[in-house]
């Protein structure tokens, strides 16, 4: 009998109970949808991935040069990271993920893109707090402190003003963004995914830190609502 619903894993984390589920959906390519829930909240679904992929495509389109070193904050189901690896000019990718079970799911091949990320020698999955590293003196690579990135792409919180935990809020401030900018190469790109419409206040903050920024609204069909849904990609480039 075909599986209609299955919980693949359930673990306790510092943020609460996290679970990986898959369920049948004949309207979806492959007939299966994967979902991540934190407590009772949906964090990620393989049904809606367009904006996560666009975070990588838009961010890297703005990043100059070759042999790029990229940092992705938040692993999820791996769609942003996998889209980064599709660019041949990537030299290294570090994916920073706070919750160890999410990394484990990829390494065990429990999620569709797990094998792609785990087998690519350019990609390193790092169990750490992105926000703590962004605020630290040493940066994102403990083996090579102060290594600068060509782009940092972030998809953890729901938006700049809606956070998974209140502690994340400090990042979306003048001091937090200045610290992040210090970990980018000249001309480097900061890209941020948001589930909400563009926030003028946050755009002004990006302009203050980076000099200029832009917002891209990514739309995609939502067959549950019968309408289009949208997400926002913020991009800011560090001055040369």
Image: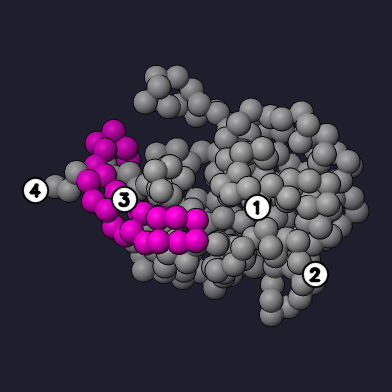
Q: Earlier in the sequence, mark 1 or mark 2?
A: 2
Q: Nearer the observer, disc 1 or disc 4?
A: 1
Q: CA distance from mark 1 to mark 3?
A: 28 Å
Residue 22 image point, x, y percent: 29, 49
The magenta stretch spans residue 200: no
Q: CA distance from mark 4 to mark 2?
A: 55 Å
Q: Earlier in the sequence, mark 4 or mark 2?
A: 4
**Marks 2 and 3 close (CB-CB < 8 Å):** no
Along the viewing direction, whichever of 82 and 140 lies nearer the viewer: 140
Magenta stretch, overall SS:
strand
Residue 133 image point, x, y percent: 70, 65
Magenta stretch in the rendered image? 5-30
Q: Nearer the observer, disc 1 or disc 2?
A: 1
Along the viewing direction, whichever of 189 and 142 lies nearer the viewer: 142
Quarter assignment of residue 207:
top right
Q: CA distance from mark 2 to mark 3?
A: 38 Å
- Residue 104 to residue 196: above or below: below
Task: Give the secondary structure at mark 3.
Answer: strand
**Marks 4 and 2 close (CB-CB < 8 Å):** no
At 40% from the left and 55% from the top, the residue drawn is: 17
At 65% from the left and 51% from the top, the residue drawn is: 168
Look at mark 4 in the image and give the residue it sits on: 1
At 56% from the left and 55% from the top, the residue drawn is: 74
- Residue 86 to residue 117: above or below: above
Look at mark 2 in the image and give the residue it sits on: 137
Look at mark 3 in the image and give the residue it sits on: 21
Mark 2, Cα crowd under 10 Å, few <14 / some 14-19 / many 20+, is few
């Amino acid at each position: 009998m075909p599986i209609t619903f299955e919980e693949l894993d359930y673990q306790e984390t510092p943020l609460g109970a996290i679970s990986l589920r898959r369920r049948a959906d004949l309207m979806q390519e492959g007939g299966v949808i994967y979902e991540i829930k934190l407590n009772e909240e949906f964090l990620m679904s393989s049904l809606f991935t367009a904006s996560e992929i666009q975070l990588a495509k838009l961010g890297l389109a703005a990043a100059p040069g070759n042999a790029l070193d990229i940092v992705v904050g938040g692993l999820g189901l791996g769609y942003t990271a996998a889209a980064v690896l599709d660019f041949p000019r990537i030299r290294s990718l570090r994916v920073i993920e706070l919750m160890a079970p999410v990394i484990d799911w990829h390494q065990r091949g429990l999620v569709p893109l797990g094998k792609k990320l785990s087998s690519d020698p350019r990609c390193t999955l790092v169990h750490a707090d992105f926000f703590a590293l962004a605020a630290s003196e040493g940066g994102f690579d403990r083996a090579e402190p102060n290594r600068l990135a060509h782009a940092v792409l972030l998809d953890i919180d729901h938006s700049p003003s809606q956070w998974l935990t209140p502690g994340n809020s400090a990042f979306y401030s003048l001091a937090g963004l200045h610290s992040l900018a210090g970990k980018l190469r000249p001309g480097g790109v900061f890209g941020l995914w948001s589930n909400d419409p563009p926030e003028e206040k946050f755009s002004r903050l990006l302009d203050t830190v980076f000099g200029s920024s832009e917002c891209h609204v990514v739309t995609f069909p939502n067959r549950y609502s019968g309408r289009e849904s949208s997400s926002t990609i913020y991009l800011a480039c560090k001055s040369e």
